[in-house]
Amino acid sequence: MIGATRTPDDARWYRLALGALVLSAWAALAVWGASPFAGLLSHRENGAGTLPLLPRLAIFVAGWTLMTIAMMLPSSLPLINLFRRIVAGRADRAQLLLRLLAGYLAVWASFGVLAYLGDAALHGAVERLPNAVAASSVIGSALLLLAGLYQFTPLKQACLTQCRSPYSFVVEHWRGRHAARDAARLGVRHGLFCAGCCWTLMLLMFAVGGANLGWMLALGAVMGAERATRWGRQLSAPLGIALIAWAALVLTRWAPFPGA
C-alpha cells in the first residue's frame, strides 16, 4: 500500500515535532510568566479581577494544557514511542498518533477544569470566614498533607505501575479494530492512569502557579523520575515523607507555602 511504509524521514520529523511541541510549551509559559497575566494560571486570581468566570476558565485551561505538555508529556514518551512503532506500517499512523495525544491531553484539560471550579468554590467559602489568612495557611498545609499521604495509597501504586509499564499497557488496551476510536481511547486511559498517579502533585502546581517555571521543573522532574526511571518507585515513600513534614512546618508556620 502506498504510504504505508515508514521511512527514516518519518522518525526525524516525528522527533522534531515532539521536541518542538514541548519546547514551545515551555517557551509560551515562560513568556506568560513574565507577563502581567501570570496570575491567571494560579489560584490567586480565582474569583478576582474583572473577567467573568467562563473567560477566565478558558484562559486557565489553555495555560494548563500548555503546562501538561511541558511537564507530563516527556515522561509519557515511552508509551507514545511504543505506540508509534506499533502503527508505523499504517497509512494513517500520523492521525492515530494525534488522536492518542488528544485523548491524553483531554484528560488533563478536564482535570484542570475541575481543579479551577473547585478552587473557585473554595475561594468563595474562605472569603466568608472571619480569618481568611489563617484559613489559607491551613488549606496549604492540608494540600501538602494530602499529597504526602497519597504517595502511600494502593491507588497511587496501582496507577504508577500502569504508567511504568508502557508495553503491558498498550498490549492490554490497544485493539486496533476501530483504529481511530481505539487510539483516542488509549490516550484517554493512559491519561486517567497518569492523572491517578500525579493528581495531588499537579494540585500543588496549581496552587503554586502554573507560570512558575522553577516549580514546574522541580515537580515535573519528580513526576517524570517516578514514572520513567528504573529507580522511580524508590522515590514514592521519601517524597511522601517530605511532603508530610512540609505540611507540619507550614501548619506551625515554620515554613511558608509557596502559593500563599
Image (cartoon, helix red, strand yellow):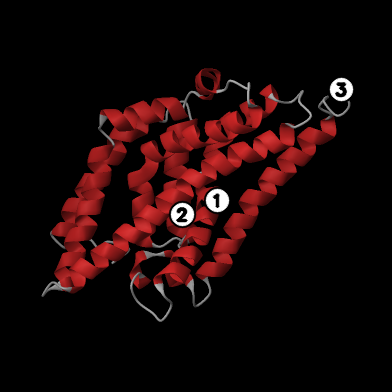
Identify the residue at the far bottom of this view: 50
Residue sitting at x 16%, y 63%? 253
Task: In this rendered view, identify the residue nearer to me: 94 or 157.
Answer: 94
**208 displayed left or right of 56:** left
Q: Which residue is mark 1?
A: 70
Q: Which residue type does callout 3 highlight?
A: Met
Asked whether disc 1 touches disc 2, contact meaning CB atoms under 8 Å apart, the reply is yes
Instruction: Report which quarter residue 148 is drawn in.
Output: top left
Q: Residues within 10 Å of mark 2 (few under 14, many from 20)?
A: many
Nearest-to-viewer mark from 3 and 1: 3
Looking at the rendered image, the disc whose residue lies closer to the viewer, 1 or 2, is: 1
Give the quadrant of the N terminus: top right
Residue 28: mark in rendering: none
Between discs 3 and 1, the one toward the N terminus: 3
Mark 3: give few (<14), some (14-19) or many (20+) Cα within 10 Å: few
Secondary structure under tag 1 reads helix
Q: Find disc 2 in the rendering and name its residue.
A: 216
Instruction: Please give the name of the residue rendered at 22% of the width and 40% of the height, measured from the top-left corner.
Output: 149
- Nearer to us of marks 3 and 2 is 3
